[in-house]
Image (tube, grey):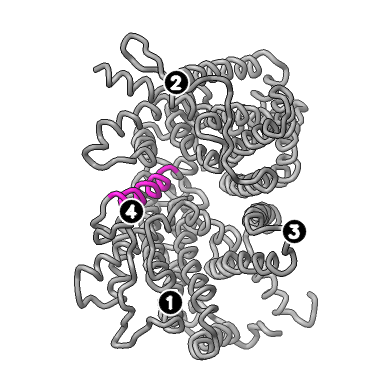
Amino acid sequence: MFFSEAGQFSTSYAADRRILRLRQERGVVWAILGVALLVVPFVGNDYWFSAILVPFLVLSLAGLGLNLLTGYAGQLSLGSAAFMAVGAFAAYNFLLRLPGLPLLAGFVLGGLVAAVVGVFFGLPSRRIKGFYLIVATLAAQFFVQWVFTQYGWFSNFNSSGVISAPPLLVGGYDFSDPAGRYVLTLLVVAALTALAYRLVRSDLGRNWMAVRDMDTAAAVIGIPVFKTKLLAFAISSFYLGVAGALWAFTYLGTVEPHGFDLTRSFQVLFIIIIGGMGSILGNFIGAAFIVLLPVLLSNLGGSLLVGIIDVEQTENLQKIIFGVLIIAFLIREPDGLASLWQKLRARARLWPLRH
Amino acid sequence: MEFFFEVLIGGLLAGIMYSMVAIGFVLIYKASGVFNFAQGSMVLFAALTFVSLLERGVAFALALVITLAAMLVMAFAIERAVLRYLVNRPPITLFMATLGISYVIEGLAQTLWGSQVHGLDLGVKDEPFEVSGILLSQFDLFAAGTAAALVIALSILFNWTRIGLSLRAVADDQLAALAVGLRLQRIWGVVWAVAGFVALVAGLLWGARLGVQFSLSLVVLKALPVLIIGGFSSIGGAIVGGLIVGASEKLAEIYLGPFIGGGLENWFPYALAVVFLLFRPAGLFGDHAIERV
């Protein structure tokens, strides 16, 4: 009933190929965007902006980047944080060394540098696949972190290797307060998400999925496998790079190379496992889960279990819960929370009938 | 030149320590095709359990037996709770499940035993002595001897026992093994238990060297390039890979470090592994996959 497509006919190819084909879908998406952009900035408080909403959005974008590579193109990567670091440090240096460069151009340039680095570390995918490829991405992870700590130039010779956000000015408006940073992040993430939706439905996206499902078969039907993989590395790293720049500038404000360590890579990987591999919506659900669960657990631990469990133990407990959840998801819901959403949607279509 | 040999031999011996962790990987990969990221946390769990028992006044031998029993229980629990439900899933799913397992084991180990650093004394001194002008560490030699004993014990287990025979059968062809009546699930449990035993040995050696602490679980990151160079399915490969990684990272640190900056042992083995892979995509001794559509 809510999602009925009855009576909605596509009268042109363009209409048929829309991402949001149903009136209801368009309504929901625009409503969410409208509320997020026009209502939330005025009603939210600073804690929500800087501790929950901004990291949620940035991690969704990072998850999206990894999902393009792992969920769509099938190339497992444990080096996401490295590409985030490249994006952050590159954007920082562009904005520092080219005075007058617009902030958004800095993000784009940072993303492009990350893409180049991504392509470089994707080169081994010509001969290596599967688990062996993890090594190439781990090489990226450790090498990039080492370079940024070793060579002071990248952090403008800051004694502790920390980079700080430039003034967040876009088109004369100052986005430096928490609400502004939220809006800026939201706009960037929304634009890149829309682009990703187009991308995975383009022929490049179809090629990615063919390579993911079986690259030998993809090669047989004439898909340029290596080029497709490299493009996946490039575009995924671009997204991760922009996410890294946002992480550094709009979320943390200051960040050191250590902030992009292997733990961060795992965090991004968990987002796509929990959210759903090969789903764009899933990244947002997964990121919400990853951001909210620790908050929830520490609140629970703070109120219910005072005295029984100390702070250190909640951290361990959190680890166990994460581990169990990941295993549970892989067993019960291999397509992640996004597939729950799909089922819900299918139910809503028939409601109030059952079949 | 003497200095070169000293670095080389020190590196080779350090490499054997990496091999110890890598062997645990190889066992599980061979028998079930699972790339077990949790091996590092199993090392941590084993070492932490053993040390904590010792500190509570349990005798050395008894602590060893209890820890072994704990690893055994853990192995079968993992099989029962996780692997059983993931049969026939893509290898990447299984890999990610072991990531989850490693989180659970790490959390569990630290919940049970706390996260402070423990010292572990195996009664072997970590003091260098001189052999024809080259400084050698007694502890390194002890570790090498242990590794050799471990490899011999494993090859006896694999080649001359009934259980080893079934392990090899499963590694060779799971379907065929099922068809002749082998119980796959029990065999997986056994393999994980053997890997748990290897983790215990590795944990004791690494723990004696670094102290038993959380960073012990990170040795898994040292073992990865070792595995890649040696190939996932060869115990001999794990040893050779360990030697190559150990020697080359020490040599790189000494001879390359001054030019591009120190502390490169974190990424150098990986770069080396990638170069190896470009020439031999399945490692030195790995099985070459034949693909068909």
Quote the CA–CA distance across marks 3 and 2. Answer: 45 Å
Quote the CA–CA distance across marks 4 and 1. Answer: 26 Å
**Picture disc at residue A185:** 1
Reading the image, the residue beneath label 4 is A119
CB within 8 Å, label 2 to label 1? no
Q: Residue at x 70, y 67 (%)?
A: A300
Quote the CA–CA distance across marks 4 and 3. Answer: 50 Å
Three-letter code for the amino acid on which mark 4 is drawn: Val
- Respond whether the residues carrying marks 3 and 1 are from the same subunit: yes
Of the pair B210 and A322, the residue shown nearer to us = B210
Above or below: residue B23 compared with residue A313: above
In this rendering, position of residue B256 left or right of residue A35: left
Q: Quadrant of residue A290?
A: bottom right
Reading the image, the residue beneath label 2 is B127
Above or below: residue A82 compared with residue B48: below
Q: Nearer the viewer, mark 3 or mark 1?
A: 3
**Picture disc at residue A158:** none
The N terminus of chain B lies in quadrant: top left
Local secondary structure at mark 4: helix
Q: Is residue A147 magenta?
A: yes
Three-letter code for the amino acid on which mark 1 is drawn: Thr
Quote the CA–CA distance across marks 2 and 1. Answer: 56 Å
Local secondary structure at mark 3: loop
Chain bearing tag 3 is A
Three-letter code for the amino acid on which mark 3 is drawn: Ile
- Respond whether the residues carrying marks 4 and 2 are from the same subunit: no
Reading the image, the residue beneath label 3 is A308
Q: Nearer the viewer, mark 4 or mark 3?
A: 3
Local secondary structure at mark 1: helix
Q: Residue at x 44, y 20 (%)?
A: B127
Residues in magenta, as a range: A135-150
